[in-house]
């Protein structure tokens, strides 16, 4: 908690007369001053289905835009953002630069409330919200937060009542956290809200007269805008599904990976660059989870593709790679294409072997662009046949993301994707074999 700033309201529109200003010290404000502040506010709206809605049966509160007031308080200069980063972010995320943008002032008077909701992202790099609660006398108005079946209650009125005067309370949370303000029983709950964004690296201004254009695919905001428009189309994956992206850039993987090295998927998250990094960040900004996965393309049992969430070393074996990968948690991948499938040269063996390896779990992946061979990872093993020989296990890397149905793209609970693969029973496998024979 921090010392309380004073609040200044500027009446608009401005006149040529002496500028009238109203000062309110929110640590010692009177009921009359808070009543006046509430009266100066507009009715608070909220976002619903990409529209701004005024509905006092869902939200009853007052709001004031940033051009209507001034605060001699800076969340970043005060050190509050550093404190928030320490509590909210974990590990390497804590070292990232964060920008806080003042968004609104809200006054919740008696009987005001805000039913359960999630904040509308104000940009593809917005990741959370910071709410500062001033020590104005009030009862009720606790903030309830819910995420992944868990619930927390932040009652600022109680926190401030038990603290010395001239203090503020604050709470910060990620954009995918559902929250609500329960009914205020008495007094005035006064808050300011900041939108929190990931701050990019310092920008260097180009010399005068030089105009610099960056590729659209390397801008997280541009990529996010394209994905947002795509997800807003109800005809696009109406029931949800899994999207697949091949990486655009090459990365310096070891010529031969072994178990003494860090898993390449872990390493790659630190290496992502250009369009790959922009795509990864844009997906996260949309409250979805980008996942890096290893893919093994079988050439002996085509069209079998096996997806792994970690690299493995086979060691010494006389068993086919496909069986070993499936035993180690591999999941079958079924390729889907929005256009015609790419032309692939048939290997010496093609077709499903009824006695070959079968994936008991599968994921349908709708490919946006294919994986390229320049990001293959390989590990060495000794294979025993008629005689021992050195062989290599080759794995490609792709970025996958589960997407929910139209209207609720973040809800992947019913999607048979990377998080919850589809279980394949024997009858279904037999039907697929019969279909292939008929073809």
Image (tube, helix red, strand yellow):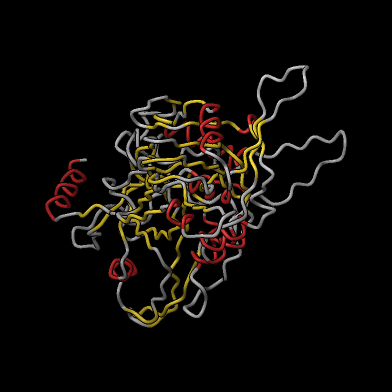
Query: Looking at the image, which residue is at 37% across and 78% down?
Result: 383
* Residue 68 placement: quadrant: top right
Residue 327: horizontal and vertical position, in percent? 28, 70
433 is higher (above) or lower (below) than 268: above
- Vertical side of 282 occupied by 333: above or below: below
333, 422: nearer the viewer:
422
Q: In this rendering, would 326 be left or right of 265?
A: left
Q: Quadrant of the N terminus?
A: bottom right
What percent of the width, then of the height, locates residue 99? 63, 48
* Side (left or right) of 57 relative to 289: left
- Image coordinates for residue 65, horizontal then vertical, percent: 58, 31
Q: Residue at x 21, y 45 (%)?
A: 436
The answer to whether residue 302 is visible is no
Question: Is residue 321 rendered to the left or right of residue 135?
Answer: left
Above or below: residue 16 compared with residue 66: above
Residue at the top extreme of this rendering: 16
Name the residue nearer the viewer: 366 or 401: 401
Furthest-left residue in this view: 427
Q: In the image, what residue occupies the spot 39% across and 80% down?
A: 315
- Residue 431 visible to an observer of this rendering: yes
* Number of on-image labels: 0
- Residue depicted at x 51% and y 67%: 264
Foreground pick, 86 / 388:
86
């Amino acid at each position: 908690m921090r010392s309380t700033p004073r609040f200044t309201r500027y009446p608009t529109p401005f006149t040529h007369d002496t500028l009238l200003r109203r000062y309110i010290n929110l640590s010692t404000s009177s009921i009359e001053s808070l009543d006046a502040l509430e009266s100066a506010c507009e009715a608070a709206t909220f976002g619903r289905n990409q529209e701004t809605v005024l509905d006092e049966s869902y939200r009853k509160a007052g709001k004031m835009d940033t051009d209507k007031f001034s605060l001699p308080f800076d969340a970043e200069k005060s050190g509050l953002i550093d404190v928030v980063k320490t509590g909210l972010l974990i590990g390497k995320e804590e070292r990232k630069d964060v920008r806080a943008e003042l968004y609104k002032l809200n006054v919740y008077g008696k009987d005001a409330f805000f039913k359960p909701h999630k904040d509308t992202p104000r940009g593809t790099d917005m990741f959370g919200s910071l709410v500062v609660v001033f020590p104005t006398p009030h009862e009720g108005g606790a903030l309830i937060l819910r995420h992944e079946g868990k619930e927390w209650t932040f009652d600022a009125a109680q926190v401030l009542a038990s603290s010395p005067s001239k203090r503020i309370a604050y709470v910060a949370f990620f954009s995918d956290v559902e929250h609500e303000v329960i009914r205020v029983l008495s007094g005035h709950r006064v808050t300011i809200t900041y939108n929190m964004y990931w701050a990019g690296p310092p920008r260097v201004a180009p010399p005068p007269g030089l105009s610099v254009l960056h590729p659209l695919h390397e801008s997280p905001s541009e990529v996010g805008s394209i994905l947002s428009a795509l997800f807003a189309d109800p005809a696009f994956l109406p029931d949800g599904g899994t999207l697949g992206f091949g990486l655009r850039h090459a990365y310096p993987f070891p010529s031969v990976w072994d178990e003494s090295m860090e898993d390449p998927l872990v390493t790659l998250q630190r290496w992502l660059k250009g369009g790959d990094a922009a795509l990864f960040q844009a997906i996260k900004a949309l409250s979805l989870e980008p996942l890096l996965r290893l893919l093994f393309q079988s050439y002996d049992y085509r069209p079998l593709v096996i997806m792994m969430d970690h690299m493995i070393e086979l060691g010494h074996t006389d068993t086919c790679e496909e069986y070993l990968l499936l035993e180690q948690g591999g999941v079958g991948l079924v390729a889907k294409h929005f256009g015609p499938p790419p032309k692939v040269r048939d290997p010496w063996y093609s077709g499903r072997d009824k006695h070959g390896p079968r994936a008991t779990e599968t994921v349908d992946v709708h490919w946006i662009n294919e994986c390229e061979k320049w990001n293959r990872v390989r590990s060495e093993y000794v294979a025993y046949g008629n005689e021992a020989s050195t062989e290599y296990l080759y794995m490609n890397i792709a970025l996958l993301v589960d997407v929910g149905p139209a209207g609720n793209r973040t809800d992947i609970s019913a999607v048979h994707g990377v998080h919850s693969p589809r279980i394949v029973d024997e009858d279904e496998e037999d039907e697929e074999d019969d279909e292939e024979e008929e073809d």
